[in-house]
Amino acid sequence: MNLTKHGNPRAKATLTGALLALGLAGAAQAIAQCGANPCAAKKSGAMQEQHDDPCAAKDPCAWKNPCATKKPCATKNPCATKNPCAEKNPCAMKNPCATKNPCAVKRPADYTPSYAESGDNPQELITQGRTLFQDTSLSGNGMSCASCHGVEQDEAYQATFERPFPHPVAMGKNLYGMNEVHADEMVQICMLNPMAAQPFAWESNQLSALSAYVVEVQKRFAGQSYDL
Ligand code: HEC
């Protein structure tokens, strides 16, 4: 836009006034004007005569659009990623544990574990668990437990794993509201979630073997003597 060339003193004065007003009034006024769309008002008169709508090219409110920052859901909806209960909590809809398997990861009331959480387990059971730990056919997504956790080295565990079972685990708390998690419950949680598979039958040998194995892994992780 070349105002001098255009030679319309009224247009020049008005535009200068408008620019001054925007410049001097500061952010508060700019924000206030955004609501009322200042461009709408200024389209009439001098600027239109110039066939040059400065608002079309440069929205004076764009840089201070309060909606851009105040729309909290646009980018940071905490529910989008953090509400695990929406689909994963089997207890959300029904009375937990009352009927068939709504609480797939919690020990059922009538269940007696056939591994020792204290760690006194037969070597054969632990070895069997070690094999299962590396078995990708257990998952629904091609992973094995070892894909995330390793075999010779411990990976993807958090500091809570340093405490003997049962203990608090963020995944158990976040997904299922569990304050403490037993080794077999942790196996079930990882089966259902990262492994994208069904949980084991509670009385199954596989669950016992994997539980016995992770009890030993826990000891290694905690820097105690272990038997792997
Ligand atoms: C896709 C990655 C992934 C796979 C596969 C996986 N896990 Fe996990 N597992 C995790 C993550 C992440 C954590 C940490 C959870 C936490 O501490 O909140 C975890 C934690 C654990 C823990 C320790 C929790 C504690 O502090 O007591 C055990 C035990 C465990 N997993 C066992 C298994 C077993 C058994 C399998 C296979 C059936 C398995 N995981 C498969 C990701 C995985």
Image (cartoon, rainbow, N blue to C red):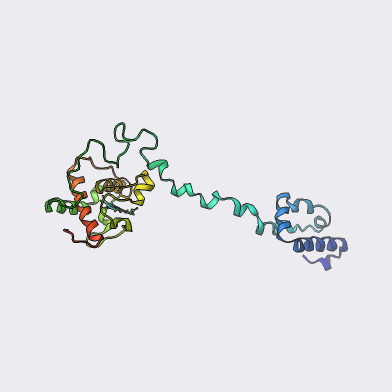
The residue lying toward the viewer, choosing from 8 and 59, is 59
Q: Residue furthest top?
A: 99
**Quarter of the rendering occupied by the N terminus:** bottom right
**Quarter of the rendering occupied by the C terminus:** bottom left
Whether residue 158 is visible to the viewer of this picture, yes or no, is no
The residue lying toward the viewer, choosing from 204 and 3, is 204
Q: Is residue 206 left or right of residue 15?
A: left
In the rendered picture of this protein, how many numbered marks are placed on residues?
0
Residue 128 at what x, y percent from top left? Answer: 15, 51
Residue 215 at what x, y percent from top left? Answer: 22, 53
Residue that appears at 44% across and 46% down: 83
Q: Residue furthest right?
A: 9
- The quadrant holding residue 98 is top left
Residue 11 at what x, y percent from top left? Answer: 84, 61
The residue lying toward the viewer, choosing from 155 and 177, is 177
- The quadrant holding residue 20 is bottom right
Whether residue 165 is visible to the viewer of this picture, yes or no, is yes
Residue that appears at 32% across and 38% down: 103
Residue 32 at what x, y percent from top left? Answer: 72, 53
Residue that appears at 37% across and 41% down: 89
